[in-house]
């Protein structure tokens, strides 16, 4: 009758395995002995407390060292790096060349404005360089952004706000002289930002983290703001989306990566049921239709005929699944660009035939360009930069 | 009192006088919560600080630290959910064999602790998903043995309170974790590696506390089963439970446990997952975006405040009554969400009811189930109930998502409310025998 395989008595050999070596090698043995039959411990309370204090001391040292190391590294990022770009404070204008803002005239060739990631006191600030000299000295505006875009004299800056017990995020609409026009609190971590060509409509996407470690799922939220009327469409999930003549009404819909055709029409990505779709939306009727599958982070060409996007290419490893493609809207056919690396960005058209995009770099990310027609080769535009916008 | 209960605890009380330290709490005479329960609660508190530190920074780490876009895709899929159910059952069974609750718990906590430094090395989504899966496997392994140890080291009449104290401590850790992570990131901008390292140190500390302060023989088990069983035979039925796999499966032949599991499954099938509740709060009650990340804290705060009072109440008026009553709180929350009124206080009411639902059901179900499982199979039995409930909730999320797709959020929620009402009626009608006392 019920003879179990362990004849375990006081001091029996099984019980706790001392396998958790890295956690507390010394404590494992001690705990083994200290917790036999019903708490009758060979090792007294004093002994166990001593072991506990010793373990806490070791673990606290490791934890303290880790924080100290990370803190020192964070401090180094505020020091100018050797060989990095020259950055100095100054005015940056988002005004198109035709109507330059007073006091900060944009050169005729235009200006390239981006988030500078170069180490030093101006790290993460919006900086401007002449479009013809992207590696020249950077003019830092003093405005810090995580993501940025600008068009038609309007800028959108998604930035972090430090709180007492939490960091939060907000979208800041900027005028041509980088003054705050409006701020909107955000529900999550910023990823995409766009402005319509006229500067009137602004859109952004944030990640909303999964609420549970167990689920591990993330969702996105995309909002569109009309800067003229002040009307905020806080989520595209309120839109009526039609796919093959049927209304899409799933709980798992996610939208991201708006790109504007004009102040009414836009393209974006919709994900539902494990697929992504290119949608064409209308901000006045709040409707959208799906055009085709497997299009993420679309970016409309200046002439409105092509869309650059990241495509999930079959057969690639799941940790680098995207390649930069261009879609012809008239035929809905796509072709790859010469960039063969994994691109996880919403590309920007620097002109009618060139794409700019970010790739991971030594100081966060670097900007590259590649011809949109599939010819040529990728070229480094400038290092330590993110979220470019051409002002011209 | 029910038969299985006396069978479980009699050997401890009669055969082995040393095996009844449950009344020796930190405050003898004032509290019947045993030192073991407090130690397990401390381990859970510490471990939750560790794991919630990681949870809190993970999205930020993926997006800004690694520059990844986990757009709309989950890191852990349905296959993993099935696997974790299996792990839970295996963990429960292994713990019963030879009464190795503590050993299995140490492996589970240890595995989760070791996953923290691995996060430093994993830089791609599939790898990070694998590390998270291993972490969850550790959690699956340890949950049933831990709950078995709580039930075995608390006197039957105060079991609800013991679980309440444990769950309150657990939730405290969950609330402190994000704060700790925030303080580290404030000290060291982008210091995700520091967060993971500190998280590992905290988790290792939890394992140390477990090793040092939790006895490896659960007191309720008394002497090793082989020797104490004859004494148990005199008190209950002659065949004491030998913790084999077959005996674990045969648990379902027990009417009381089967009824309880069935009810837990039926109620689980009508329990909409947390993420849907928060999504509905936002869509139907118009909770502003900036509060979205804080909604889980509201549920946790209510859970924390109510876990002990509701556990004690369950000890007095009956655990089954409180367990089913907790679902009434959930039903009321559904009702408020369905009403869709945008009055300012409603979101607080929904979160309060949601937290009350957890406080009245999470630990209370374990306390109720413990009474239906003999001590020798306690861990397997609790694992069975937990797995049934978790699987039912998983099915519910899939069904709820599908209903949302087909008919919209309001109809889906209405359906869930009807299902919950039916399940509650069934749970009241099928009330497991013996559960009405106490």
Image (cartoon, helix red, strand yellow):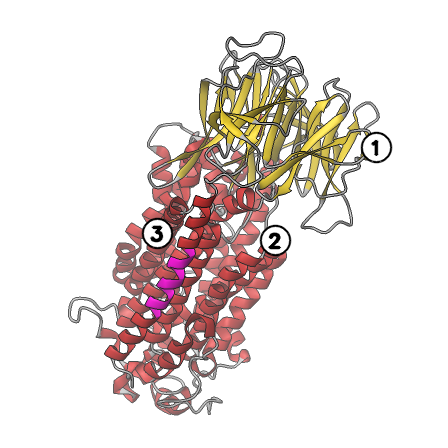
Circles 2 and 1, Cβ within 8 Å, touching? The answer is no
Identify the chain of the residue marked 2, using the numbered disc in the image: B
In the image, which is nearer the foreground, mark 2 or mark 3? 3
Q: Which mark is residue B77?
A: 2
Q: Badge 3, how many Cα within 10 Å: few under 14, some, many 20+? A: some
Q: CA distance from mark 3 to mark 1?
A: 54 Å
**Which x, y percent locates residue A79?**
47, 40
Please count the marks in the image: 3
Q: Earlier in the sequence, mark 2 or mark 3?
A: 2
Whether residue A335 is visible, yes or no, is yes
Quarter holding the C terminus of chain B is bottom left
Query: How would you rate the neighbour count of disc 1 (Cα within 10 Å): few for under 14, some for 14-19, many for 20 or more?
Result: few
| Badge 3 element | helix
Rendered image: mark on residue A375: 1
* Residue in view at x 69 percent, y 50 percent: A318
* Place of residue B276 in the rendered image (x, y in percent of width and height, measured from the top left): 50, 42
Give the magenta-colored segment's residue range: A55-66
Q: Nearer the viewer, residue B180 or A375?
A: A375
The answer for how far apart the CA atoms under marks 2 and 1 are is 40 Å
Q: Indicate yes or no whether the magenta region holds residue A61.
A: yes
Labelled disc at residue B176:
3
Q: Mark 3 and mark 1, same subunit?
A: no
Q: Chain of mark 1?
A: A
Residue B372 forms part of the magenta stretch: no
Query: Of circles 2 and 1, which is in front?
Result: 1
Q: Is residue A60 above or below residue A38?
A: above
């Amino acid at each position: 009758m019920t003879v179990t395989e362990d004849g375990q008595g006081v001091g029996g050999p099984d019980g706790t395995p001392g396998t958790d070596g890295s956690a507390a090698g010394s404590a494992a043995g001690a705990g083994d002995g200290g917790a036999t039959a019903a708490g009758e411990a060979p090792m007294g309370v004093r002994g166990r407390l001593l072991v506990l204090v010793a373990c806490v001391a070791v673990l606290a040292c490791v934890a303290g060292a880790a924080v100290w190391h990370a803190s020192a590294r964070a401090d180094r990022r505020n020091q100018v790096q050797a060989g990095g770009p020259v950055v100095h404070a100054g005015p940056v204008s988002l005004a198109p060349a035709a109507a330059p803002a007073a006091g900060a005239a944009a050169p005729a060739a235009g200006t390239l404005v981006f988030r500078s990631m170069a180490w030093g006191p101006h790290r993460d600030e919006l900086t401007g360089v002449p479009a013809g000299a992207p590696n020249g000295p950077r003019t830092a505006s003093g405005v810090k952004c995580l993501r940025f875009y600008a068009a038609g004299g309007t800028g959108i800056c998604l930035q972090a706000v430090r709180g007492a017990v939490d960091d939060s995020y907000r979208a800041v609409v900027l005028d041509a002289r980088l003054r705050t026009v409006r701020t909107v609190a955000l529900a999550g971590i910023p990823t995409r930002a766009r402005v319509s060509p006229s500067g009137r409509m602004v859109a952004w996407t944030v990640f909303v983290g999964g609420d549970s470690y167990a689920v591990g799922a993330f969702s996105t939220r995309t909002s569109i703001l009309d800067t003229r009327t002040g009307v905020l469409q806080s989520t595209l999930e309120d839109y009526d989306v039609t796919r093959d003549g049927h209304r899409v009404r799933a709980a798992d819909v996610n939208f991201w990566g708006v790109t504007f055709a004009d102040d009414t029409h836009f393209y974006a990505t919709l994900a539902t049921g494990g697929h992504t779709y290119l949608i064409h939306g209308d901000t006045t009727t709040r409707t959208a239709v799906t055009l085709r599958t497997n299009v993420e982070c679309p970016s409309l060409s200046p002439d409105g005929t092509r869309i650059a996007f990241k495509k999930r290419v079959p057969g690639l490893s799941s940790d680098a699944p995207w390649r930069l493609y261009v879609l012809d809207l008239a035929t809905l056919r796509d072709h790859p660009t010469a960039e063969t690396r994994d691109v996880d960005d919403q590309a920007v058209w620097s002109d009618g035939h060139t794409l700019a995009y970010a790739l991971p770099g030594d100081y966060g990310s670097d900007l590259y360009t590649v011809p949109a027609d599939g010819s040529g080769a990728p070229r480094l535009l400038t290092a330590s930069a993110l979220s470019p916008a051409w002002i011209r | 009192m029910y038969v299985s209960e006396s069978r479980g605890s009699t050997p401890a009380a009669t055969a082995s006088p040393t095996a009844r330290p449950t009344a020796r709490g930190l405050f003898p005479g004032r509290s019947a919560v045993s030192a073991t329960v407090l130690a397990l609660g401390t381990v859970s508190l510490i471990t939750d600080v560790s794991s919630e530190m990681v949870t809190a920074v993970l999205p930020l780490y993926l997006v800004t630290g690694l520059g990844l876009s986990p757009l709309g895709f989950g890191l852990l899929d349905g296959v993993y959910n099935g696997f974790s159910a299996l792990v839970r059952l295996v963990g429960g069974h292994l713990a019963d064999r030879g009464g190795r609750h503590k050993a299995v718990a140490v492996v589970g906590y240890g595995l989760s602790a070791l996953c923290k430094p691995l996060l430093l090395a994993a830089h791609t989504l599939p790898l990070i998903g694998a590390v998270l899966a291993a972490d969850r496997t550790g959690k699956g392994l340890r949950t049933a043995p831990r709950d078995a140890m709580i039930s075995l080291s608390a006197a039957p009449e105060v079991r609800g309170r013991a679980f309440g104290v444990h769950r309150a401590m657990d939730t405290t850790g969950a609330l402190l974790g994000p704060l700790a992570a925030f303080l580290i990131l404030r000290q060291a901008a982008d210091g995700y590696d520091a967060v993971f390292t500190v998280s590992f140190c905290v988790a290792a500390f939890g394992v140390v506390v477990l090793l040092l302060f939790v006895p490896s023989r659960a007191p309720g088990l008394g002497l090793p089963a082989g020797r104490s069983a004859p004494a148990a035979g005199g008190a209950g039925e002659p065949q004491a439970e030998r913790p084999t796999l077959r005996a674990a499966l045969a648990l379902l032949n027990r009417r009381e446990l089967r009824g309880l599991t069935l009810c837990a499954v039926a109620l689980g099938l009508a329990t909409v997952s947390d993420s849907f509740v928060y999504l509905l709060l936002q869509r139907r009650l118009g909770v502003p975006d900036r509060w979205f990340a804080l909604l889980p804290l509201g549920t946790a705060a209510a859970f924390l405040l109510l876990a002990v009072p509701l556990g004690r109440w369950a000890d007095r008026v009956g655990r089954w009554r409180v367990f089913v009553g907790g679902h009434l709180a959930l039903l009321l929350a559904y009702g408020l969400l369905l009403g869709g009124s945008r009055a300012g206080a409603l979101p607080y009411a929904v979160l309060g009811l949601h937290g009350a639902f957890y406080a009245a059901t999470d630990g209370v179900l374990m306390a109720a189930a413990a009474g239906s499982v003999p001590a020798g199979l306690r861990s397997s039995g609790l694992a069975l109930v937990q797995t049934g409930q978790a699987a039912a909730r998983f099915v519910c999320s899939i069904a709820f998502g599908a209903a949302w797709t087909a008919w919209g959020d309001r109809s889906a929620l209405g359906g869930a409310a009807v299902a919950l009402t039916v399940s509650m009626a069934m749970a009241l009608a099928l009330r497991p025998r013996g559960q009405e006392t106490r």
